[in-house]
Image (cartoon, rainbow, N blue to C red):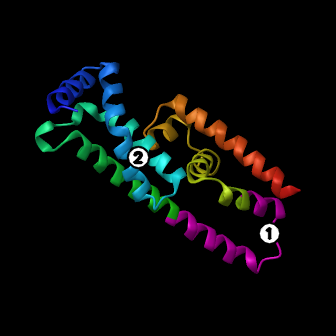
Amino acid sequence: MEADLEIKAIKGAQAGDEDAWRNLFEWHFESVYKYCLSLSAGKQEMADEIAQQVFTTAARRIGRFKQRQGTFRAWLLGIARNRSMKLQSKELRHREYKKKLLKKTSGSEKVNSGHLLVHKVLAELPVRYRSVLEAKYLRGQTVKQIAEANSSTPKAAESLLARARDKFEEIYRQMQD
């Protein structure tokens, strides 16, 4: 890919040209995805999540990209690194939460088995599903707030929430049997 062609595509994308954005995506997706895989230690699901967030963020913030500060690819990889750190931080908090939950419930006879099952199901969900369900049902956030927190549209947040509910139900039924 020629540098002039890329600069033209960047300017086009900044002006709202969808074809220009599509070209940038196609030119850079493979290298960004490989970087996401390395950041996620080969965990494909996490790499998928990071890559999706990278391009969503880049599409929203394309107007902030400045050619004189570095290459477009370097900018995308920086977004990937930041999103990866954020996601890994969420994972760490989840593991800590899981440990605390196990400590709380291990000596207590009063814990409602249904309540415990819900927490077990949440622990089995992929991070993106668990976080959106916790945001909606444990923290009481609106779909708009969830969308803003995930750098997405309300429609995308609703879709993610629906998939998360379906997966929750599937795992819940399996654990009940």
Mark 2–mark 1 Cα distance, whole angstroms, equals: 43 Å
Q: How crowded is the residue under tag 1: few (<14 C-alpha within 10 Å), some, or many (20+)?
A: few
As drawn, which residue projects farthest toward the bottom?
107
Q: What element carries label 2?
A: helix
Q: What element carries label 1?
A: loop
> Residue at coordinates 70% horizontally, 45% vertically from top-left?
167
Task: Name the residue beneath numbered marker 1.
Answer: 111
Q: Is the magenta stretch mostly helix, strand or loop?
A: helix
> Residue at coordinates 83% horizontally, 64% vertically from top-left?
113
> Residue at coordinates 50% horizontally, 53% vertically from top-left?
46
Given the image, on which type of amino acid does mark 2 rest?
Tyr
Tell me the mark number nearer the camera, choosing from 2 and 1: 2
Q: Where is residue 82 in the image (x, y as percent from the top left)?
A: 34, 53
- 87 left or right of 170 in image: left
Q: Position of residue 56 (x, y in %)?
A: 40, 36
Q: State the extent of the magenta-drawn residues as a range.
A: 92-118
Q: Position of residue 67 (x, y in %)?
A: 14, 37
Relative to the observer, which residue lies in front, 128 or 138? 128
Upstream in sequence: badge 2 or badge 1: 2
Q: In the rendered image of this protein, does residue 115 appear above or below residue 49?
A: below
Given the image, on which type of amino acid does mark 1 rest?
Val
Task: Name the residue beneath numbered marker 2.
Answer: 33
Q: Does the magenta stretch include residue 109?
A: yes
Q: How crowded is the residue under tag 2: few (<14 C-alpha within 10 Å), some, or many (20+)?
A: many
Q: In the rendered image of this protein, does residue 12 appear above or below residue 38?
A: above
